[in-house]
Structures are given as structure tokens and as C-alpha cells.
Image (cartoon, rainbow, N blue to C red):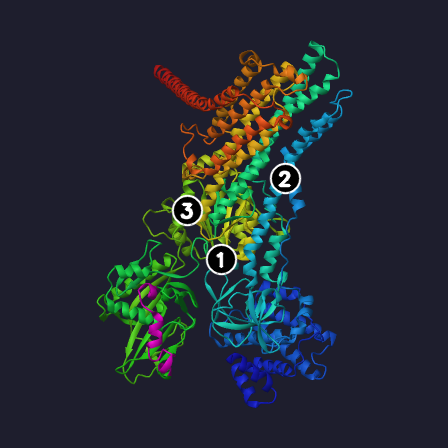
Amino acid sequence: MAGEENGHSASNGGATDGSTGNAEDTRFGGLAGAVDQSISSIRGLGATGGKQFQFTIKAADLGELSNERTRLQLADTLEKGLTIQKQDNKPIDEEAPSSSSKVTADVLALVSRIRQLEADGQPAEHSPEAREADKNAEVAANALATVLLGSSPETGISEDEVEYRKELFGSNAIADKKLDGFVKLCWEAVQDFVLIMLIVLGIISIVVETTIGLDDGESCGPCWIEGAAILVSVCIVVFVTAGIDYAKQFAFIRLTKSLNETNTKAVIRGGIQVSVTDDDICVGDILSVNSHNLASIPADCVLLGPPGDLRMDESSLTGESKQILKRPGDIILSGTTATQGSGKMVVIAVGLYSVAGKIKARVYESEDHEDELGGEDDNSPLFVKLDLIAKQIGLVGTGCAILAFVASCIIGLAVKGEPASSIVDYLIVSITVLAVAVPEGLPLAVTLALAFSSNKMMSEQNLVKHLDACETMGCATTICTDKTGTLTANKMTARAISLATKDYVVQDPSMKLGDYVQQSGVHSKVVDILTTLVAIDTMDETVLYLDADGKLEGSSGNPTEVALLNLVHDLGVDYAKIRNTTKGRSDQGLLAEHLAEGKQYGFSSARKMMSWAVPLEDGGFRIYTKGAQEVIIARCTKILSEDGDEIEMTAEHRDNFGKTGLTYTRRGMRCLGLAYRDLPAGFDLEKISATTKNSDGADAFEAETELVGLALVGIEDPLRAEVPGAIEQCYEAGIDVRLVTGDNPETAVSIAYQAGILREEHFVHDGDDKVSSNLKPNVMMEGKSFRSAVYREGVEGSKEFDQAAFDKIWPHLRVLARSSPDDKLTLAHGLNQSNLYADKAMVKQLKREYGITVFPDRQVIAMTGDGTNDAPALKRADIGFAMGVAGTQIAKDAADIILLDDNFASIVTAAKWGRNVYASIQKFLQFQLTVNISAVITALVGAFAYQTSPLAAIQLLWVNLLMDSLASLALASEPPVDSLLQKPPVNRTEHMITKRMWANMLGQATYQVVAVMVLLFAGPELLGVEPGHEVEDRKENSVHYTIIFNAFVWMQLFNEINCRKLKGEFNVFQGIQNNPLFCGILVVTMVLQVLIVEFGSVAFHVSDGLEAKWWGLCLGLGILSMPVQQIINILYKIGKHYKGYRSRKRLQRNASLSTRHTNNIAEHAHHE
């Protein structure tokens, strides 16, 4: 409020009140003072704003200012706008054209001066030139707000001009990404190759059965039902798939809705501070921010004066967690956060013209997994393989159908002499064979498996936006992760302290430093001094929020000071009680009267320290000091011993402090020094030291010299406790983890080593300091070096990505430090496009010389991130993870999976479920294709023998679609096991059907075919029933074919239990009790089969029920599938051992021949 009052007096009194003018001159002086008074005069006349205001600057110009973010660009923007005003001869206030002309002239003179100072180079900090440059920038910011944007730092804009400004400069509401309509999702679902085949098959079936398939005078009746059922099955698959995708979109909307409703900011309109939503903010608004509850910046702004201690966290855009001090005239970017202080700023760019808005538009407008580097990803590995399998099955099915048709024609027409009209019957049989070959249940099975897994992942804190993202994560070979908020907790924490000559370093990420210090038995006097120093020598705005039980709920203020207060809290001390009961520090109750007896020495970049002196009860003062460790230690003459006694600081003590500080820094910590001094009664707190200087050469206060060194504190943004274990699991699963961060190399290396991303083999010398200089080549690179290495000069000087150069780097690369937002995108693109695995010689060389194993296929890249700058890379990666709590909206929009708990360890959960999806679909394929193989052979034999199939198309549709879809859900419900993460990812090009699966499928299919053939050809005689083909010729449903159908189904049902295991495990029932859904679905399917056989005669082409003895036969044949599986397992193991034995014998024979050949050569040489 003080700033507002000062500004208000200036604006109203600048032209008439000499004292006010002098005050302004004192603050600015010279040209800046004259320009400020000139601007104040037109603000006092109230001619700004409103629809009558003629804006001479465009949204694109202000957007350019946001992009460049320099004082020179600010000057260019002012000049451009004022030049147009001058050309148009449109004064700002028609009643005072002289004032307007004077403003234009004064501001243009200021622009020239700014350019002159910028041309002279960066002035020394705190020099007269630097102070003048700061003054000029502050006045330039005021001129931008008032002269070009028609606003006022004191009164803002009026409410009735908001819409007008939105029309001119755009709205801050970026349109949400348009939801895909249900019809569009249905259209996308129907593009599946299998579904297309089914549609064609269904249409052909209906046409043939209802037209050319009928004899003269024969009515169709229910003949169309089989074709219609196929089309209905397609509709079911399409609607289920589209419905799940459609529902996922709304689930994501619900996730973000609550966040959007709470995004409000404080702006000044009509002289009153009001609260508006982020979407309602417009260019010219005066935005008030503070680090407590109005910290996030919704649009690009220019900071206005007077100067304050506003510090911004720009890590969401830059990835750099360092706090940035902002001065008037500086650009404040949308998407950043105020962490300390407060300030007023004028909005210059909103919506698509702001920096964050441009990134959001870039995410929304680009297609999935495309980027400007020219790369476009394939479909997910799962769907690539499924498409291949579907096409292969389609070709085999088509071949079998043609074979059945040709064979039927030859046997029927040429051998048996049937009439030519029988060709129609043969065509129907061939269509039935094709229907059997095509796995109708596969598309729905995949959809159900993915949907079930995604729902399970939701309960484990993974919101899956795209179903195929489940399985894609299971194939991931590389995770590129940022540091802040992903590996780390995104909060500064004290992790080490050298206290009273003793060093305490916490190695366990789950342990707090305060607890560790307490366990170490530090003297109570030392702890008292430490906690009192921190409580007193921290700002009032830095606070911890505790619940009624004293447990930490949150914090606000300076992150470094928050870390120190947390240390005090962990030591069991109430910092607030110390603050509020210390005379000269407390502003509470009666002690507030004594506040002036203390003195605060504020922090500045020049001093690099902050102190607070408080009076002592027996007279005199105690001054508590904290600051940069090199500054504090240099001013210490004594040190506190372990017993709490003050002793002289020796050269050894000073050297030890220096070594400790260097160690902390190399570990990526920010190192602070803590010290104090007792001052005698009557000491002059304003006295200047005759010998000691501040860091910038200015005179230091005498009170801040001859200090007693207390501690060095190492503060870092700590790892999440679960991260090292999660990364270890990633490595065990064959997934590489790479760190991409904006931090400096030492911090990045420290975090990467603690997390387990960097290991001993990555360093040149074992046991030495884990610092960047000790890393092997290309293990850690800085962004600038990385870009220069992987980009080459292209046509007309443009930069072109060099894949060959990238391939030389990425196998070694584990840490990318000081990276720009586009570096992450480059990394995702380069890894995705790399074909290094195909260069077998290079792969062997990497393994031999560096111990690096290159995955034998294209990389599948997972990208984690929470910041706005991560969004394009999240979009480009095969699988993008965004943080649900700390992540920006843009990052969430770009991601495939959202980690609801912001926990890196949840990525391991996603990988486990992803691999489980792959295994589940393999189990289903094993089940489905066993059905298809045996059914196709059965149908072919029927076509050869009787020119008709013993299994009707509708019966096979029940097996292939409904029963198999239930089987897919049952098999998909198998929970993941830890063993899934103890093997490498599956290759993109590796076929989904393994050799073991082929053995299981062919073995079971052989058993089923033999059983069906015996029933087909010997059944009538053995069972005493009428042959089915004879009954079928009378257009009746036969008991013979019903027994075959029933036995066939029960063999599939018991084989479903076998299919729970893929590796030939003996106990196929293991863990089945933990999967009630599987058991339930199996029971339901069995009940449905009983109902179909007993009551589905017309619809399912069966007889009117079966006798008990036939039921016993069918169940017996089904149960036999289980011992048959054990026989298959034994035979496979014998064959595998025999193959291994033959390979060993062949190698031994080759070695023997080689040895014999060598001996012959040696003997021949000897004779010569």
C-alpha cells in the first residue's frame, strides 16, 4: 500500500506540488525524473483508457516484448508506439496537446538513453550507471502502461473497457481442446483390419443366404441371423471401444475442472482491487501478486515500480529451480510463480500471445507424436503387432476359404456329380471357414483388456488418457525425466550441516536432518543457539503452517528460509514462539513497543547476507547472521565448540569449513553460513567497519564483523524417498533413465547419482568425488554442447538435426544439464528415430569397450514432466507422463498418462501394468488361436467330407466373439507380478506369438481336432446316433453335431485355465484364488453354454438338449485338456534340451575340427 500511496501522490501532485516533485526527483533524478513527472501529469488529467483511447501498439508487438524480455526490446516497443502516435498526430488528451507532445518527446529521449546505456555494455552492479539503468527501466515500464496501454498503476483500467481490450489484444482464455465426438470415435474404431473383414463377411453372408443361397420356393426364415449376428458383433466392438474413449475424455475434464474454478487473481480496476478469474484478465490490467496466495502469473507482464524484493520461480518454463530477482521493467512470464515479496505489474500479453499460451497452442494444434523435426511415430507397439497378426490370420483364412471352396467344387461337382446350383452351398461353406479363421473376438478382447487395466491403474494413481498408453509403457526402453517436482520433492530441504565443528550429512533420503542431528546427541546449548538464530533471522513472510497437533501442513515464503524453519521444526522447537517472545523482533502484544530496539540488516545481492540484532536482558545486543558461506566464514574470528563454548577460529578450522562448503556444493547443495556475535552495551548498530568491506566493495557494518561461526547448512531440493528404489526397478526391467534438467552440472550429477541414474561405471575413477569432471565422455552434457553436437549447418544457415552425430552420443548420455525446453524434444525425437541397433558392429563395440547394452530394436520413449516447457516433448514421446498435482495444465493436456500422486515410483506401476497388458493379450491370443486352428481344421475336414461344416457359423461366432470376449476379460484381470519387471522390454519387431505359445496352441489344437474327428467320423457308430450330415440335409438340427459343438466348447473352457500360464508352468491353478473375476467369468460362461445347448435350438443351431451321458462325455473331453497341457510341457522341455544338446555337440565338433586344423598347420610348418 505504501507503494500505491507514493505513486498516487506523485500522479496528483507532480505538476503542482513542489515537494512531491522533489521527492520524485530524489528517487529518479535527471531524465528519468522528468519523464516520470511528465507521465504523472497526463495520468492526473485522467485521459487514459476507454474506447476513445487510440492504441498504437498491437498484440503481436507486445508478444515480441514477451519473447525477447530485454530492456532494449522495451525501448523498441515504446518507440514504435510513440512514433505511430506522432505520425497519426493523435494526442492522448485533446484538451492538452502540449502535455501529450511533451510526453512523447520525453519518452523518446528516455528510449535513446536506454539504448545508449545498453550499447555501453553491462554496467558493474551498484555502479551509478547501473542505478540509472534501473531507474530508466522503471519509468519506461510506467510509460508503457500509461502512454501505450492507456492504463494507470494506481487506478488500473475501467470495467467497461475490458471487452474492448479483449477484442484488440485477445482473450486470456485459450479454448479448450475440442473433444472428439462419439461418431468420430466410432469411425476411428471401425478402421480396425479385423472389423473391416467382419463387416465384409457379414454383408456377404446375408446377401448369399437370403438370395442365391435359397432353393426355388424356399423361404429364408432365420437364415439371415448368422450374417446379422456378425454385424451386431462389429457394432458391439465399435460402441464399446468408442464409449470407453469418449468416457475417458470426460474423466479428464472432471479432473481439471476444480482447478480452473479456483484460478483467480487480484487486479486494480477503477481504482479498486478486485478478484477476477484468469480467463477475464486483459492487456492493461494492473495485476497485484504476492508470494503467499496470489503467486502464479496468468499472463505475460512488465513489473512496475517502486522496486521491491520480488523473486520468481521460473522452473516451470526453464527447468531451473533458482529464484530470479525481478526489478521494475523486467518481464514476468505467464506460468511462473512468485516465491518471495510482492509487486504490481501491467499485463502486456494474454492467451495465444503469451509465452505459456504459445506453448499450449503448440500442443493443441499439433497431431499426436509429431514434431517440427520431421519425425512421426508409429502406432503403439501392441497395435503394430496386432495389425500384423490380424493380416496374417486374414491371409491364412482367405487361403483356407479358397481351398474349401475349390475342394468342395472338385469333390461335389466332379466326383459326386452334384448339380451346378450346389456351388452356392460350397460358397456358404467357404464363408463359414473364413468366419472361423478370423478372430472376431480379438478387437473387443484388446479393448476390454486395456480398459480393465487402465481402470486398475487409476486406483494406483495412474490416470490413463489413451487406452493404448497402458501397453506402450510396458514396452518402454527409456525414460527421460526432469528433476524438479519429478525426481525431487520441489522444495528446498536442509540435508547437511556442519554444526559446532562436527559434520552431519544425511545419506538416507527418508530421514530428516533434524532427526539425525537429535540422534547424534548434539549439546542442547548448541541447538538452542541454532534454533534461535533461524527463528529470528528469517523474514516474517516465511512461515510454516501447522495443524492442531503441530504437524506440518504447508509453508510459504522464501524456499531457503522455509528449509531452515523446517530444520528447526524437526529439532522439536517452535520457531514462531521464539519470534513472538523475543524483544526487538516481536511485533506481538506489549513486545511490539520494543520492536524498534532491534535492527534488521536486510539481505541484498551486494551484501550476500542478512542479520538481525536484538537487545539482551543485561544490556548490549546479540546479532544473528546468515548468508553465503564464504562471506560469513571470512568474517568469523571465533567458532562454537561441540560443548557450546566459544573458541578461537584457527586456520585449520577455516580450512575445514572451506572443504565442507565445497563438498556440499559438489553434492548440488546450496551452502549457507550461520553465525552470531554478542555486542556490548552502548554499541552503535549503525557503525561502519573501517577494515571490512561487502562483496561489492561497499562499507560493511561493524556489527557484522568478528562473528562466532556456528554452522554451515547444505540445502538441496531433495529426492523423493521412493525414487532410488523406483529407478533401480527400472534398470532391472531393462529401462534406461536419463535426467534432463535446467540445473547446473554439479547439481544435476549429484541428484542423478543419489537417484541411481549415475552409477560407479559412469565415473572415471571409482571412489573419487561424484562430480561432473570425473564422468566419462558424453555421460553428462550441457545443453549448449549437446545442441552444437547434434545440429549441423543446413541450407541457408539453418540448423538441421544430425541423427548420425546423435547416435554417437545417446548410448553414453545419462544427464543433460542446463538444458533448454527444446533439448528434451530433441532427445525424444532422436531416440525415437535412432536405428543404431541395426549397426551390429557398433553395438558390439559399445558392449565390449563401454559395457553399454543397446536394446535390439527401436527405442520406446517415456517422458516425464510437470512444467509448461515439458509439453512438446511429452507430446512427441511414445508415452508422456505429467504430474497431476504439481503439473501445469498444458503438461497434462499433452500427456498420455497423468500421475495423480506426482510420484515417480508410480511409473514403475505403469510399466508393470503395461507389461501385464501385453502378457494378458498373449494369453488371450493363445486361447483364441487355439480355437481358430482347431475350428478351421474341423470346418475344412467337413468341407472335404460332406461339403458342409459340422460347426455352424453362429456356433463359431459364440465361441469366437462372446465366449472369447469374456475370456479376454477374465485373462486381463490377472494381477501383475513382480517377475514382469525382471526381464527386458519386448522388442517392437518381436512377434507376439512365441515358440512356447506355438507349442501350446498346436498341442491343444491337435488334441481338440483328434477328439472332434473321432466324434465326427466314428461318433455315430460309437455313440449310437444318426450321422449329423444326414440330419442336416433334412434341414433339422442333429444330436451328433450338437455333441461335437458342446465337446468343442468345453475343451476351450478348460483350456482357458491352461492359458493363464505362458511359460509351461506346472500348476495352472496358481493364484487363481486371488482372481475372483476370472473364476466368476468362467462360471458364467459355463452356465451360458449349458443354457445354449439346452434351450437355444433355433438361434444356435443345436438339438433340443442333450442326455446326461452325452454331457458326461463332453465334460470328460474338456477336462482331458489339462493333462494334455502337462504332456505338451514335458515334450517341449525334452525338445528344448535335445536342441541344446545338439547345439553343444555341434560346437564341440566344430571346436575339435578347428583344433585339428590348427595342429595340422603347425605340424606342416614344423616339417618345413
220 over 663 or under it: above or below: above
Q: Residue at x 29, y 68 (%)?
A: 710
Q: Could you tell which of marks 1 and 3 lies nearer the N-terminus?
A: 3
Amino acid type at mark 2: Val
The answer to whether residue 629 is visible is no
In the drawing, what numbered circle is on residue 727? Answer: 3
Q: Which residue is mark 2?
A: 238
> Do callouts 3 and 2 mark residues in contact (Cβ within 8 Å)?
no
Amino acid type at mark 1: Ala
Classify residue 174 as left or right of residue 866. right
Q: Nearer the viewer, mark 1 or mark 2?
A: 2
Q: Residue at x 29, y 75 (%)?
A: 677
Secondary structure beneath label 3: helix
Q: Nearer the viewer, mark 1 or mark 3?
A: 1
Q: Could you say where residue 852 lies in the image, as x and y percent from the top left?
A: 43, 40
Which portion, as a residue range, is magenta?
A: 567-592
